[in-house]
Amino acid sequence: MLQSYDYPTFEYIQSEEQKNGTVTRHKVVVIGGGPVGLTAALDLAVQGIPVVLLDDNNTVSVGSRAVCYAKRPLEIWDRLGCAGRMVDKGVLWQIGKVYRDEELAYQFDLLPEEHHKTPAFINLQQYYLEQYLVDRCQEFPDLIDLRWKTKVTDLKNKDGYVELTAETPDGCYDLEADWVVACDGASSDTRTKLGLDFEGQFFQDRFLIADVVMKADFPAERWFWFDPPFHRGQSVLLHMQPENVWRIDFQLGWDCDPEEEKKLENVIPRLKAMLGEGTEFELEWVSVYQFACRRMDNFRAGRIFFAGDSAHQVSPFGARGANTGVQDVDNLAWKLKLVIEGNASDSLLDSYCDERIFAADDNLKNSTRSTDFISPKSKVSTAFRDATLDLAKTYEFARPLVNSGRLSTPTPYVNSGLNTPDVDVFSGSMAPGTNCADAPILENGAEGWLLNKLGGRFVVLVFGNQADNQHFIEQEFSCDIIRIGKDIEDPKGILTKRYDAKPGTTYLIRPDQYIAARWREFDPSAINDALLRATCQR
């Protein structure tokens, strides 16, 4: 097969503690060097927390894998200083089209409004994404210790720390950690070693993934076919990737033989039927997957936390896997920082489970519904699916019912105990528990973006100059104040509109850029109470 990407080999370096035969206690150990684990290490380092990352491999993922990355993870990676390369390399898209047979049944726009820094989605092979994350991690040599070819063979919760054993080419050694974040995937060895449940629903259908190198006239859009003429009775998904690589997913059905389906003599005819006999192409990667929708009961086991596929697994429809995992560690990192530095109690870490289990259940619900629509299990379900597709061609009411994969969006933490409920009347979507919407700003005459200004700390965002006692707020709450109209400007009024703001409107924003509270007037006492609530101190 053709290889359009040169896979790097990361150097294995024996750790000092293994050389010296000593046992070292680390602040945080991250297990797994995929997108979620690398993001966890990077987020902690950006906040000044040293971290050791252990991965049993020494290169990036093979194949495109998690190819679609959504707006919210891109905003997180932008805060961490590495989204620029991803967006520059990736294929930007926001239009999706759904076909039944050869007819267009429905199309959608994922970013119908303007004035956002990051795009709705990019398509980027996972190996590029991991490479960019590794490169960024290597810019923190004093805070991130990347240990390749290092497999965790045992770990145990102890009184106040975690004891780990790791295997390397030089043998085994022991190390300790105050906290561990397990990001080692759906087949998590960490979860297995601890004997923790991972329950849910396995789906019988299998899908063939093919990365195809070709020059084609397809636009940079997401195309999904139900019952196309080139693959009758099944579905097909097409995505454009960088370097003229196209990701094509073929539904195979439950009774296929995965090993037979991966053979070139079976893959090539499928592709020719779709692309046409005269289309020149080469295969880069082929795989067959069977998926599940399941999660752990609790994402925390003592001082060990689970994030990404190790904690929850969804079907690939809707790009909810890696995108959700990145949001897991975005939620966890700032809480770990506060607890490690003694600025919050251990109970704040329990809110990670509360909020991210709520998000996981939302993703599982949407993923299961997508799977049931794409692969109906009864004649009645099939009739409903087909009728919906027929109606969607003409009637707008039917289009939201078309479900070729509800694409990943952040889940608002509407019931989080960290939120301060509204006491004033607001309109719009920027309620407590919601991630902040971006907007263009001016700072000292220079154009910028709100989310970049917020950074990764607690911020009091005030519309107007009502925050006269800024020093008191900063001293009392260890958070910054940003005043719209004084510290930054809202040149187009977009920020004011998106936040339904009037003079005096105030927002308390968490380090993960979620809204903790909002008021119509600047009130230091109310802000203090909300900050204590957002850090589980009240």
Image (cartoon, grey):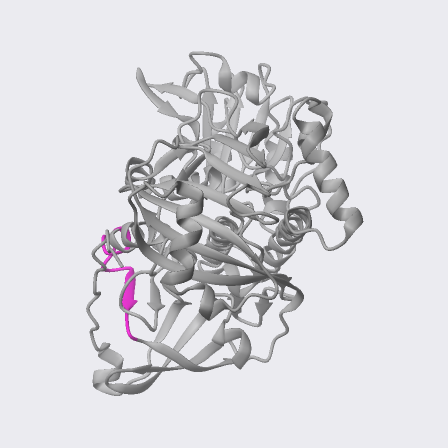
Q: Quadrant of residue 23?
A: bottom left
148 horizontally vs 290: left or right: left
11 horizontally vs 319: left or right: left
Q: Is residue 73 visible?
A: no
Residue furthest out toward the right: 380
| x, y percent for residue 331 | 52, 50
- Which quadrant is home to the N terminus? bottom left
Residue in the foreground of this view, choosing between 47 and 123: 123
Residue furthest out toward the top: 492
Q: Relative to residue 270, is residue 301 depicted above or below?
A: below
Q: Relative to residue 189, is residue 510 depicted above or below?
A: above
Q: Is residue 368 visible?
A: yes
Which residue lies at the image location 46% right of the left edge and 22% below the top edge? 483
Residue in the foreground of this view, choosing between 139 and 250: 250
Q: Quadrant of residue 178?
A: bottom left
| x, y percent for residue 35 | 39, 55
* Magenta segment includes 145: yes
| x, y percent for residue 59 | 27, 64
* Magenta segment includes 478: no
Residue in the foreground of this view, choosing between 126 and 148: 126
Which residue lies at the image location 76% right of the left edge and 47% below the top edge? 381
Q: Which residues are magenta?
A: 136-149
Which residue lies at the image location 20% right of the left edge and 73% below the top edge? 13
